Amino acid sequence: MSYELSDESSYSTASQRPRIWLERLLLAAFLFCLLIGLGALAIFLVVRNNAQPSLNADPLQLVRSNLIAPQIALRELSGDPAAALASQLLQAGRLETARAILTFSVDISPVERAARLTALARAYLAANEPASAGQVYALLVSTAILEDAIPILERVNLLTQSADGLSKAGFPAAAIDAAAQATRIAAQSPGLLPAQRSALFTELRSVVESLPRTDSAVESLRALLADYARNPYLTGAGMVLTPTLTTFPQLLSYDSLTQEKVAARRQAARIFADRIDFTGGVDIEPERQALAQALIEEDQARAQFYQNPGEISRGQQLWLLLDRRAWLVEKLRVALGGYGVTIVPEWEAQIGAIRSELAAAHGFLNTVMAAYAAEQPSALEKTLLQIETQHWLAAQAMRGLYPNAPTANISEVLRGLQDELKRQGNPLALPVIYEENANPPGFRIQPAP
């Protein structure tokens, strides 16, 4: 009897042994597959995050030159007004060509440029291009914060629309940041009626309510807006800058040689654009070379004019510096393929030098404006003009038109000037400094003093 039990036990143990090895083998296979799956997921997340477009990239580099229609973009180089051309392109659905104009143009007013950028961002969303939409909305945020020429109500509306657009484009953190900035302007700006503040807060609440509730910043902002909506009877404290920069430049006529070369470039650009339109971009080398030569000759004529303008006033000197800066932006656009076609290969090889010249041009402008500020009749007017100058420099930096801009230095100068206003008893209602941790990093309005 005992022998039979032992035999059965041995048989049972022997029969279980293969099963145990099979289970171990299956478990090992499962763990192996799990590791492979986790590795694939990690790679996917890394690739996806690396592919996620940055809102803090150079705006000039974000323009996709391969999507620009050169036969239309070149019309600006031939003398067509940038604002009107951008409007026509938006209506025609030529989004990237419109973006190129709005990115590089320096002669569109801040109010009009903001309106066109808003239309462009919405069009990108409608075209299912959220990355491009988010990038344009990020530009709008900086525009609303730094462009003193834009009225307060419009600045809040721009930020509110940007918050909504950034959320829809898949940038929730940037959307919260924009909404917080809109709230701050609406609450801190003096001179707004309770009914106006109430309308602004109501619109902002509808945008913030649509944001994900997973972020504590959203909950804080939601609670703050609820308080403001219940009590819109805020007074706002401090001053709001009144723009004066545009009153200082005094027009200086080009010399005859520069006028001649400008006319020749416009004619060559028109012929080149017509040729591209007619041939579809085939057999265009003679026209390309003609425009390249015209641009090089204009550059040489302008260099002589800028260096030897004759006896001029300080206002004319400021105009001259602004005009030279505008020409350097034009050269950089050509060098970066901002017209959708290679025009002057030599400039493409000199992008670094052009950027350096453009950066130096902003430094010269800062120096001239400092001299203007020193001549103001009161300490208050002097400080306000200095702050307005730094706002302008900061705006150009955020647009990418001030290469390698010393944003930290601009921020520190602003901080010092704003502190000076407080000491004078005239604090700014909307003080600005650079925030490295903002989303994206940039200049942001601070709490009122």
Image (cartoon, helix red, strand yellow):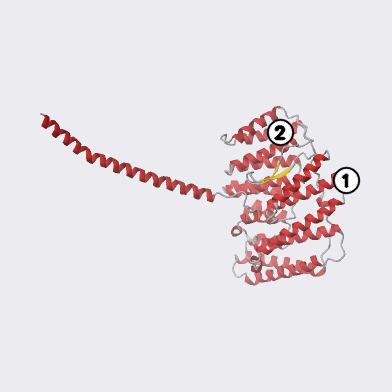
Residue in the foreground of this view, choosing between 341 and 311? 311
Quarter of the picture holding the N terminus = top left
Instruction: Look at label 1 and name its amino acid.
Output: Ser
Eyeballing the image, is 233 above or below 331? above
Dot 1 lies on which element?
loop
Task: Write the residue at 68% across / 71% down.
Answer: 290
Q: Quadrant of residue 282?
A: bottom right
Question: Residue 53 appears at what percent x and percent y?
Answer: 57, 50
Instruction: Look at label 2 and name its amino acid.
Output: Ala
Eyeballing the image, is 273 above or below 397? below
Question: Residue 165 appears at what percent x and percent y?
Answer: 62, 43
Which labelled disc corresponds to residue 378?
A: 1
Dot 2 lies on which element?
helix
Q: Residues within 10 Å of mark 2 (few under 14, many from 20)?
A: some
Residue that badge 2 annotates: 199
Q: Is residue 111 shown to the viewer in this render?
A: no
Eyeballing the image, is 362 above or below 242? below
Question: Residue 411 appears at what percent x and percent y?
Answer: 72, 47
Task: Write the residue at 73% across / 33% down.
Answer: 197
Q: Are marks 2 and 1 in contact (CB under 8 Å)?
A: no
Quarter of the picture holding the C terminus = top right
Q: Is residue 137 left or right of residue 384?
A: left
In whole angstroms, how far apart are the C-alphas of marks 2 and 1? 38 Å
Residue situated furthest bottom in the rendering: 286
Q: Residues within 10 Å of mark 1 (few under 14, many from 20)?
A: few
Eyeballing the image, is 112 above or below 343? above
Q: Quadrant of residue 274?
A: bottom right
